[in-house]
Every structure is written in structure tokens, then in C-alpha cells.
Image: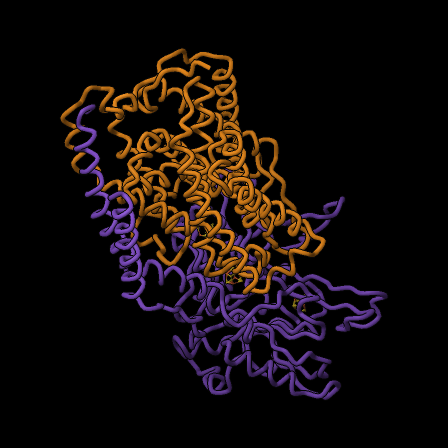
Amino acid sequence: MANHTHAPAPLGGSLFTPFTLLLGTLSAIAGVILLYRLFYGLGAVTNLNDGYPWGIWIAYDVVVGSAFACGGYAMALLVYIFNKGQYHPLVRPALLASLFGYTLAGASVIFDLGRWWNFWHIFWPGYAQVNSVMFEVAVCISAYIVVMWIEFAPAFLEKWGLKDVRQKLNKLLFFFIALGVLLPSMHQSSLGSLLVIFGEQIHPLWQSGMLLPLIYLMTAILLGFAVVIFEATLSSTGFRRQLETPVLAPLAKLMYGLLAAYVVVRVLDLLLRGALGSAFAATWQAFWFWVEMACFVVPLATLATDRARRSAGRLFAGAVLLMLGGFLLRINGFLVGYMTGEGWHYFPSLAELMVTVGLIAFEILAYIYIVRNYPVLPAAQPATR
Amino acid sequence: MDRRTFFKASLAGGTALAAGAASCPAQARETHPMPPEAVGLLFDSVLCVGCKACVAACKQANGMPMEFSTKDQYWDTPLDISGKTLNVIKAYRNGNMEAKDREENGFAFIKKSCMHCVDPSCVSACPVSAMRKDAKTGVVTYDKDACIGCRYCVAACPFGVPRFTYDSPTPQISKCQLCIHRHKDGKYAACAEVCPTGATLYGKVSVLREEAKRRLALKPGEKTEFPRGHLRAAEEKALRGAPEGKGEQRRQGWQDDGAQRYPGVAGQYLQHVYGEKEFGGTQMLMLSGVSFQKLGYPDLPPRSDAATSETLQHTLYGGLIAPIAVLGALTFIARRNVKHEDEEGGQHG
Ligand code: SF4
Ligand code: SF4
Ligand code: SF4
């Protein structure tokens, strides 16, 4: 019976607030810049060059963005594979955030492709080059986006009252859930494998070779957990709902275990490759490496006890640090630690940054719209405090 | 109950993974071997006089535009390869530059263009086969009609060779393709064709390697002969000039006579043929008196990054065996757990 209050329901409420208007404006600016890019080329809006052919539209929007969108994946893994039913209320909201994160990451790639009108070649036999890590990433991400829309369909079907379609889909849902666990495992690890072929062009602190897929996969799941905690906290404040701490604390315990395992893998890899020495050089790479490591190690200390993990504030801070750590691991690997020879510089242009900001704004906007109108968040009384 | 299912699920997942990994036993992908008929270039920094005839000829043969780097735009002055320039000669300078081919207080010239790697990163990276390596000649080609403009090749190439035209709404990659469009007329790479000193030499890689070794064996100052243009193996030369020769014979006979050799004096070389071993080998070989790292060429291991990357991909995804095994296990587990939850949650359905 306790389940009853947890059934997802639309939140309702107004869509037009100063906050959503701001989000809308930022999204519109990004749209204009992207349109401009289509007519005048990448060089007209970005600071990309042949030394840094990939900028933040790849390193952030795709590599970081999709990892931040791993909440749905991490929750599905927990609830449906490890059968941890108590986290069920977290699945739908997490899946929704993932859906937007991934869909937008996928869409933004199109604008980063120089010859975007050819993008279908990736899926076309004769063009498709299966040895390419990029091929694997592109196919898996596209497939996952489709799978997520199917997984999320029950929420729409519920709202539109299409009961029998929903029931039919429910019968097959387990297969899509399985795919929804397999595909992100594949492409999140492969996002790390993308760096393998860069060889010595990647600073030794991030060129983990054969271990790259494991490192990126572990942090993707870690980020999934962290993002769920982050979003649950924010949406309970933002929508004035009770915080789901009783569910979050045990989740944090699992996250903690994974975090410990990750730090061990990361440090062992550095030691075995003899790369740790370069962390003590007076370079920017070494500096950012320590910041990155701190983001993982600090939560290891602050979230060590059950009591600490029950504190909403600590949990939130820990989640934010982990997100920052995962962000840095990826930005460091793809940009800071990318050494392409002397004379090349890259820092994103204002237009590039505005596109990324606009993309995030659009994601949040879409999330607000959906949870207000569709059954996503568990129905509950507003917090009285 | 909960703990038990958790344990079972982990076990099933682990077994599937192990089964997947075991069924495709380490499909290690070795560095590719050199194609037997591979053609390429030999660049000899010691012979190069920095005239840049090769840069101009390359532009002409490939229809590339001029590029300016001086205030008064008098002539084509590319500073590096780019979307407009496939081949440049750069200068190395140190101290008072009093002697050629010397590291200290010296100077030297170096060519920069595609190395036509034996196991190229660009080909392995490209998701849509726009970068290809010819199975016979080993020339690495680019097809803009296939390209999606992802620039993975630009990022992957250890020599920084592929360049991209960021300023165009219809951009493309530009890189040397060894003038393959001229091969059908019996012509070869334009840079080698015009090079007055034979510093850039065209030919089969096996022949070029022999020539490189010959030069390294000479004593500095020793009198010798240098070929220029297209260097052929001795047996091929016998075919030269066959009257009314058709096909192969006639092609082999193109512009190769005694006048293409000239007497010279051996210079001071480092005992190193760059590109013989580096990165699994390249089809452009280089000789120099100054260390290659000083000239801007990286010190690369003998194993190609393409081999490492593809070994990883094949181990994880070879024949899709592992993914299918894991998917099977996941489907089984998810099915049980979803059903379980449906029964419980039926009340609010
Ligand atoms: S044409 Fe020959 S000598 Fe002149 S710059 Fe080019 S390689 Fe050097
Ligand atoms: S030098 Fe670069 S572009 Fe040329 S074949 Fe090698 S990897 Fe490809
Ligand atoms: S930019 Fe073009 S040629 Fe280079 S990897 Fe991408 S699709 Fe292939």
C-alpha cells in the first residue's frame, strides 16, 4: 500500500516563470548561433583549429553531457538488473533527464559535423567502418536514444490514456530495459576508447590505453548515481517537495563502494604505467590532474559513514564534487591533456560557450515541461517545512 | 531474498561477460605489414636546398590556392600544411646558422606532408571509410563524398597531417594523396618530379629503402651519384624505352634515363631511416643530419596506435559475441525482475 503515494503523477503548475523565460532565451540564442554556423561554417563561430579539431561541443556536449545523462542507465542497472526495487521511484525522473541529455547530445553532434548532410553514412553498409571507435560510439548512442524513448513511452501512454498499448509495451519492456543497460555500457566505455588511437598525443596522466574503457565506464555509472542524487535534491527544492533521503542514503552507499573501487583502479593504472611522476611536474596538466583527483578523493572522506550519507547537505556536496570530477576527467583527457605539438591553442569562443549553455538550458526547460505535464515524479505532498 | 537475487544477478552478468571474453580469445590485431607494391617518397634533408619547387609543383598538380603570410601578398608563402597546402618545406635554425645539417649553430630543411603510414591511424579512426589505404600501392586516400567531417582523423594522426577547412560551410579534409590522380597518365608525385636535387625521390618503398641504406653506408665526403625523380629497381630499368612499348613497359619507361642521375658528395647523416620502424613503418622515408625530433617529427614506438585501438575493439566487440551474450543475460534478468515488479505494482496500474 505504501507504494500508492509513490505512483508517478504530473506536477501541474505554471510553465511561465522568470526562470523558464531565462532558459527559453538562452535556448533561442544557441539556436541562432547554430543557424549561423550552418551557413558560414564551423570557423565562423568556434575557435577550432587543426591542432584542436575537437572543442567543447564534443568534449563537453557529447563526452561529458552523455555521462551526466547516465542517471537513467545507473538506475535501470540497479532496479532491473540488481533487483533493488526500493529505488523504483527514482527511475522515471532519472530516465527523463537521460532522455534529454542524450537526445540533445546526439542532435548537437550534427552541428559539429563539418559535412553533416553525410551523417547517415555511419549507418550505411559500404561506408560504415566497423574498426572505428567513433563508429561504435555513434551507433550505440543512436540506438540508446531510440531505446530510451521506448522505455519512457509508458509515461506518455499513461497520460494519453492508451491503456492497451501500454500493456502490450509493458510485456516487451524487459527487452528494451536490457538493451538500455547494454548500450550505455558499450558506448560510455567506448567514449574512453576514443582516446586510445591518439596514442602519445594524450598526456600519460590520461592515456590509460586498454584501461580507458573501464575507467570511463566506472565513472559513467558513478556520475549516474551522483546525478540522480543531485537532481533529486534540486527538484525537491525547486518543486517544493519532500526530499527522498531515505532512498538516497542507501544509494549513496553503493555509490561510495564504486567510488572506492574507481580510485583504486585509477591510481593503480597510473602506478603500473609509471605515469604518476608526471603529476609532480610544474605543468597545467599536473595541476588539473590534482584538482580532478581531489574531486574524487574528497567525497571518499566526507561520505565515509552512514551518518554522513544521511545528511542531505553532505550528500549533495559529494554528488556535486563527483560530477565535477567526472567532468574534469573527460575534459582533461580530451582537451587539457591533448598534446598535439607546439603552437596550437584552444579556448572555446563565446559563441561556442553560448551554444553549450543554451543546450543545457533547453534540457532543463524540457524537463520542467514534462514533469509538470506528465506522470514522472512520484506523487507526494509538498514539504511543509 | 533481495540479497540473493542481487548475488544471482551479479553472478549471471559476470558469467556472461566471461563467456563473451573467452569466446573471442584476444583477437590481437598486429600492426599491418607493408603492402608488397607499396610506393612512397624518400626525403633526404641533406640534399634539400630549400628551393620549395616541390611546394609550388604540389599546388599546381592538386589545384590548391595560394596562401599568404606576409603583409605584401607577393607570392605563395604557406607556413605549414593546411586546408590550402598539402606539402611544405620548413627550416630548422639554431644559433648563428653557420653550417647546414648541423644541430648546433646550424640549419636544415624538412618536408612536411602525409607519411602514408603502413598502418594509418586516420584510416582506423574514420567511421565512414572516407580515409582508405590502397591494398596494392598503400597510398592513403581521402574521399570527400564519403566524409562526414568529424575530424577524428585530424585528431588521431600522430604527424598532424590531415587538415580541415573550418571556414567553409562545405568543409573537407585536405592531405597529400601521392598524386594518385596523375598515376594513370604514367606520372608520379609532382614534388619528386620537380625536385632538382633528388632530395624528394619517388619509387617503390623497397627500392627507396635500399637507396637510403646505400647513402647511410657512404663515408661523409665520399664521391657518389644521386638519382632524382622516380627511382626504379635495376630490373625495371631493363624495360625502359622498349619501342612501341605498351602498358606496363611504356609506363615504366617514363622519364627515366641516365640524365636523372648526377654526381655528388655524400653528406653527414644520422644512422637512422625515419619511417622504417616508427609507428609500424611509413611509406615516406626520411634521412637527415639533424635529429628528427628537432625537425618536428615525433619519436614513435614501432607499434601503431591503430593496432592497439583495434585490438581493444575486437576483443570487446569481435563478431558481436560478447555484446550478444551480455544482452542475453541482461534480458533474462530484467524479464524476471520486471515481472516481479508488475505483480507488486499492479494495484496502481
Ligand atoms: S624541391 Fe627538392 S630541394 Fe627543393 S625544397 Fe623541395 S625537396 Fe628541397
Ligand atoms: S601521416 Fe597521418 S594522414 Fe598520413 S597516413 Fe599517416 S595517419 Fe594518415
Ligand atoms: S573527418 Fe572525414 S575523413 Fe576524417 S575521420 Fe571524419 S569522416 Fe573520416
Image check: B200 left or right of A129?
Answer: right
Colour seen for chain B: purple
- Say above or below: A313 vs B192: above
The residue at 28%/36% (across/down) is A85
Question: Quarter holding the C terminus of chain B?
Answer: top left
| Residue B84 in sight | no
- Say above or below: A173 vs B38: above
The residue at 50%/55% (across/down) is A264
Counting from the top left corner in percent of width and height, residue A142 is at: 34, 41
The residue at 51%/76% (across/down) is B205
- Say above or below: A304 vs A4: below
Counting from the top left corner in percent of width and height, residue B120 is at: 48, 64
Image check: A1 left or right of A205?
Answer: left
Question: Quarter holding the N terminus of chain B?
Answer: top left
The residue at 29%/51% (across/down) is B7
- Say above or below: A221 vs A317: below
Tell me the quadrant of ligand 1.
bottom right
Image check: B6 left or right of B267?
Answer: left
Which chain, by letter, is orange? A
Counting from the top left corner in percent of width and height, residue A291 is at: 62, 45
Counting from the top left corner in percent of width and height, residue A17 is at: 47, 12
Q: Which one is in front, A247 or A265?
A: A247
Q: Quadrant of residue A239?
A: top left
